[in-house]
Image (spheres, grey):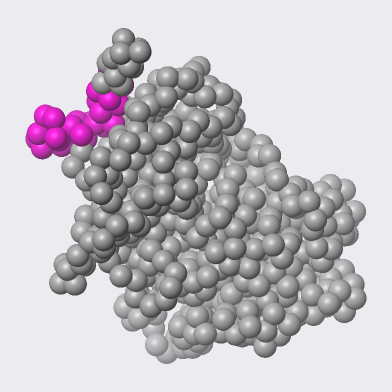
């Protein structure tokens, strides 16, 4: 039953769509053409038959899919029942897989990576064909074949209207190098057509890989002013590894967090399924993946997505060195190019292009790969930074790999950004999921400033936008930071803790504030916080701080009118003041998990049992809540 409820909940959440987000556009914006380089599979593809016929083979036709679903509803319900009961997950997989082959069959490539059919993008990459205003005029609306319409809609008036936007089109099946050459051609045509000296570039996901490849190959060019790469797949994507090795294991909790972020849901539905993995879906996907790899297995982009650390092994296992020689040659070239990203992107910056990377961190892959990621793209692949193995962190006292007078280690002590492609212009947002930049208030405002102004050149320029910051998506409900330090850090200068209600709808009551491994005490405020309101709470220092030690603050809360009565958020902090902690180079990693509150009180066995049945967070919240109530009563009596 719990598995069924979990699936039903995901479906219900998906129906409601995303909540609107307010936008803070910089007051003064540069009047330069903006080129939007979209995420994976955005560009529509057309099959051209030998008889002159045209068939729209991608993107997805919702009416066709709905028709197929309704036409196969009996089989789908039967297959779902067989899958949930784990009697025969292959039945539904075969039904879905056969329909997928019928819909997407013409997207297949030959073993050498060339298209099996005469399939091309809908638009040529010319200024005329890709201009947003021209597309809107042709199709009678402002959304058809426009990329990232939320971003464009928010800033179009600030930069001069729809005619200032251009939509890069690509055959997303092909490799990043091929598409990077096409991107350069479009940029050159835009400059020739408009007379502008440069363009600004906003890229998302796969678009980030294509754009980084363009900047690598043409580092000497001076055609791009600002290039903002959000959640970019520069060095690959966890999803490619999981699919091509058929090792998908759905992480249900991460999936639900993903859904909550994308829809900006302020109800913490994930606590209902905290410990449950959708085992039947894993079996279903195991049977479905061969149908998927039968379509995408020879796409150049899929092999470009293969993270470098896995590429050689997976290539040796899955690609025939003769039949796939052309594909291997291109993907080898791309992986060689990946290794030069630090040097070449730095050269592009030296030649006048301000390159910025905004990456999500703090999540495993939705599909199973256990590495620090935004749910789809590993943090290491997106940024080039050194990351601790998932579930571990650098031990207290850790010294960053690249020497310098700046501190590049994340508050969680899981990321060393000193080795990143661009250490001084890469921003890490803890809790930011893939593709959710627009829906996270902090990331969205940062993106606009980097894209449209010259106000920020590096992570050190504006204390409001430090290198590391926790996500400010309203689905997280609450945020906290110390008053004098950068987000996620604690120094001896700090005298207070600032809590903000991130909710757009609900008044928030803090029920508990529990620092762990930090030398401070923080008393929860009695006053409720209205949506968007902050409160500053004085902190009590218990001990002398020790620098380069990691701790956390767990904030318990309740949202008035929320279906889920209790919630919590744990934020990581690194202490930067005091004598540095000793570092054991032979044991440079330690577990990220502190002993749970329940384990401390009731022991390991009971704690493990509550975690297994999904009630550990609820139990801990209830305990903390009643402890907090007792504290409030005591505070009122003592007054």
Residue 583: quadrant of the picture:
bottom left
Would residue 337 be seen by someone viewing this image from the given angle? no
Q: From the image, which quarter does the N terminus lie in?
A: top left
Residue stretch rendered in magenta on the structure: 597-626
Compared with residue 477, is residue 578 higher up or lower down, i.e. above or below? Answer: below
Q: Is residue 601 magenta?
A: yes
Compared with residue 605, is residue 395 higher up or lower down, i.e. above or below? Answer: below
Residue 402: quadrant of the picture:
bottom left
Q: Is residue 527 left or right of residue 194?
A: left
Q: Which residue shows up at 49% across the image and 75% down it?
A: 421
Q: Residue 398 in the image: x percent, y percent?
A: 27, 66
Residue nearest the observer in this picture, 330 or 164 = 164
Compared with residue 285, is residue 402 higher up or lower down, i.e. above or below? Answer: below
Q: From the image, which quarter does the C terminus lie in?
A: top left
Residue nearest the observer in this picture, 554 or 92 = 554
Q: Is residue 303 left or right of residue 105?
A: left
Q: Residue 237 in the image: x percent, y percent?
A: 45, 65
Q: Is residue 142 magenta?
A: no
Compared with residue 621, is residue 222 higher up or lower down, i.e. above or below? Answer: below
Q: Residue 228 in the image: x percent, y percent?
A: 64, 65
Residue nearest the observer in this picture, 108 or 202 = 202
Would residue 27 be seen by someone viewing this image from the given angle? yes
Q: Main secondary structure of the magenta part?
A: helix
Q: Which residue shows up at 27% across the image and 37% down it?
A: 275
Q: Which residue shows up at 35% across the image and 57% down it?
A: 576
Q: Residue 301 in the image: x percent, y percent?
A: 53, 72
Residue nearest the observer in this picture, 267 or 406 = 406
The mark total stands at 0
Q: Which residue shows up at 57% across the image and 52% down it?
A: 464
């Amino acid at each position: 039953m719990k598995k069924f409820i979990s699936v039903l909940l995901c479906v219900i959440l998906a129906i409601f769509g995303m909540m609107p987000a307010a936008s803070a556009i910089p007051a003064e914006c540069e009047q330069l053409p903006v080129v939007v380089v979209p995420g994976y599979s955005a560009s529509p593809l057309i099959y051209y038959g030998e008889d002159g016929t045209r068939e729209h083979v991608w993107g997805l036709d919702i009416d066709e899919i709905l028709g197929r679903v309704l036409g196969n509803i009996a089989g789908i319900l039967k297959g779902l029942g067989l899958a949930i009961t784990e009697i025969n997950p292959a039945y539904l997989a075969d039904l879905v897989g056969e329909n997928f082959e019928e819909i997407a069959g013409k997207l297949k490539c030959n073993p050498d990576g060339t298209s099996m059919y005469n399939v091309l993008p809908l638009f040529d990459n010319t200024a005329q064909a890709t201009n947003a205003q021209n597309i809107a005029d042709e199709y009678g609306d402002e959304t058809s074949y426009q990329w990232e319409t939320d971003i464009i809609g928010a800033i179009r008036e600030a930069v001069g209207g729809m005619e200032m936007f251009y939509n890069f089109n690509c055959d997303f099946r092909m490799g990043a190098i091929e598409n990077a050459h096409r991107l350069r051609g479009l940029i050159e045509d835009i400059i020739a057509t408009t007379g502008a000296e440069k363009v600004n570039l906003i890229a998302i996901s796969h678009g980030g890989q294509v754009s980084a490849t363009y900047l690598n190959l043409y580092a000497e060019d001076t055609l791009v002013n600002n290039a903002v790469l959000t959640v970019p797949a520069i060095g690959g994507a966890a999803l490619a590894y999981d699919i091509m090795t058929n090792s998908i294991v759905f992480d249900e909790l991460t999936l639900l967090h993903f859904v909550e972020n994308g829809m900006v849901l302020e109800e913490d539905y994930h606590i209902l399924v905290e410990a449950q993995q959708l085992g039947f879906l894993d079996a279903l996907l195991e049977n479905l993946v061969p149908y998927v790899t039968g379509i995408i297995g020879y796409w150049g982009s899929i092999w470009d997505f293969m993270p470098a650390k896995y590429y050689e092994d997976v290539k040796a296992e899955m690609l025939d060195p003769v039949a796939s020689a052309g594909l291997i040659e291109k993907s080898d070239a791309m992986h060689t190019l990946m290794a030069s990203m630090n040097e070449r992107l730095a050269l592009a910056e030296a030649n006048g292009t301000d390159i910025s990377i905004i990456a999500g961190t703090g999540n495993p892959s939705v599909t199973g790969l256990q590495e620090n990621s935004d749910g789809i793209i590993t943090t290491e692949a997106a940024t080039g930074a050194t990351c601790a193995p998932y579930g571990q962190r650098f031990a207290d006292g850790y010294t960053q790999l690249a020497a310098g007078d700046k501190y590049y280690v994340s508050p969680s002590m899981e990321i060393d950004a000193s080795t990143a492609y661009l250490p001084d212009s890469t921003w890490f947002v803890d809790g930011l999921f893939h593709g959710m930049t627009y829906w996270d208030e902090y990331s969205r405002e940062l993106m606009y400033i980097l894209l449209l102004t010259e106000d920020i050149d590096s992570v050190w320029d504006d204390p409001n936008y430090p290198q590391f910051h926790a996500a400010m998506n309203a689905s997280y409900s609450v945020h906290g930071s110390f008053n004098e330090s950068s987000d996620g850090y604690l120094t001896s200068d700090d005298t207070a803790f600032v809590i903000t209600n991130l909710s757009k709808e609900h008044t928030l009551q803090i029920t508990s504030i529990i620092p762990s491994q930090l030398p401070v005490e923080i008393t929860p405020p009695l006053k409720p916080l209205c949506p968007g309101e902050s409160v500053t709470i004085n902190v009590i220092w218990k001990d002398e701080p020790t620098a380069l030690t990691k701790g956390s603050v767990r904030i318990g809360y309740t949202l008035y009118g929320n279906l889920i009565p209790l919630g919590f958020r744990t934020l990581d902090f690194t202490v930067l003041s005091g004598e540095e902690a000793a570092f054991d180079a032979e044991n440079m990693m330690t577990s990220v998990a502190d002993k749970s509150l329940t384990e401390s009180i009731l022991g390991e066995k009971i704690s493990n049992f509550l975690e297994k049945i999904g009630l550990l967070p609820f139990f801990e919240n209830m305990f903390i809540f009643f402890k907090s109530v007792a504290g409030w009563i005591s505070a009122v009596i003592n007054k």
